Amino acid sequence: MRQQVKIKKVLNNNVVIAEHPSYEEVVLIGKGIGFNRKAEDEISFDKADKTFLLSNEKEKEQYVNLLPYVDERLIDFMNDVLVHIETRMGQELNQHIHVALTDHLAFAINRAKKNLQFSNPFLLEIESLYPKEYQIAMEVVTMIYDKMGIQFPEGEIGFIALHIHSAVTDKTLREINRHNQLISKLVSLVEETMDVTIDKNSVDYHRLVQHLHRAIDRVYQSESLGDEIKLANMLKQEYPVCYNLAWKLIKVMQKQLNKPVDESEVIYLTIHLQRLTHKS
């Protein structure tokens, strides 16, 4: 049997607040879900093509406060955007993306209309770290252009990709940005120490960035790559500059993350650095 909920308030054609037996008050978002509806009407959860549930109290409040400032066409269109992201990612999105991405796109559209340009300093890192999210973000930007005729600058693709990544990993944007800043800092340290300019489009750069990203994840999961003392000693003798730099990077990571980094990371970092700097 379809679950029925009672409408408390119709916010617009596509958003209603309803009473739910388990979640108490919820925000339901779906195309046409509020059309010709009024308080006390009962509707089923699957009334819309795709209905999203905002049960988190703080996020619900943020969303309700945000709505008056957002073009109703965007609220309607956000449903299509989120369904597209969910379908392409092949998994459910954390509900916080409704608030965060709606908010972001509303301001991004205003910026684009005023022709305010800005750069995204982590664009290449984001593309390298989250290629699938980046591709889907490009599709979202195309959808917005097709629907609203608004052309976003390239930097927006990176920000949208971060929102998508946040929604599928349950990591906060602050946490993701902090890790991207750390990776950027480590790459700059490599360039300074080795006195090289790394080609940001090279395969080896992408490998290094992805390795650093995975190393950060391993730190949080307290994972070890294994004890390779012989290999470590050999690398220390063969590539002393890269080996010492690898230790330097690990110390920066430890300080920034405030967590111990497994010593085995030095081996794989040395190999990446040697490959990268040798080609540079």
Image (cartoon, rainbow, N blue to C red):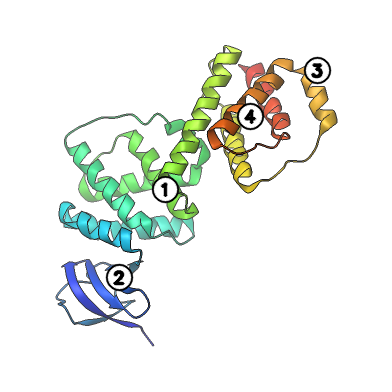
Q: Are marks 3 and 4 in contact (CB under 8 Å)?
A: no
Q: Which residue is at 46% across, 37% downward?
A: 178
Q: Give the CA distance from mark 3 to mark 2.
A: 63 Å
Pick whichever, 12 or 175, lies toward us. 175
Q: Which residue is at 26% across, 56% downward?
A: 62
Q: Amino acid at mark 3?
A: Gln
Q: Residues within 10 Å of mark 3 (few under 14, many from 20)?
A: few
The mark lying in front, picked from 3 and 1, is 3
Which badge, 3 or 2, is on the more N-terminal residue?
2
Q: Amino acid at mark 2?
A: Val
Q: Which residue is at 21% across, 48% downward?
A: 148
Pick whichever, 41 or 49, lies toward us. 41
For the N terminus, the image quarter is bottom left
Q: State the residue position of label 4.
A: 250
Residue 35 sits in quarter: bottom left
Which badge, 4 or 2, is on the more N-terminal residue?
2
Tag on residue 16? Answer: none
- In the depicted structure, whether residue 118 falls above or below residue 101: above
Which badge, 4 or 1, is on the more N-terminal residue?
1
Q: State the residue position of label 1.
A: 136
SS assignment at label 3:
helix
Tag on residue 237? Answer: 3
Q: State the residue position of label 2.
A: 26
Number of disc labels: 4
- In the depicted structure, whether residue 20 falls above or below residue 14: below
Q: Are marks 3 and 1 in contact (CB under 8 Å)?
A: no
Percent of width and height locating residue 26: 30, 70
Residue lying furthest top: 195
Q: Are marks 4 and 2 in contact (CB under 8 Å)?
A: no
Q: Amino acid at mark 4?
A: Ile
Q: Give the CA distance from mark 3 to mark 1.
A: 45 Å
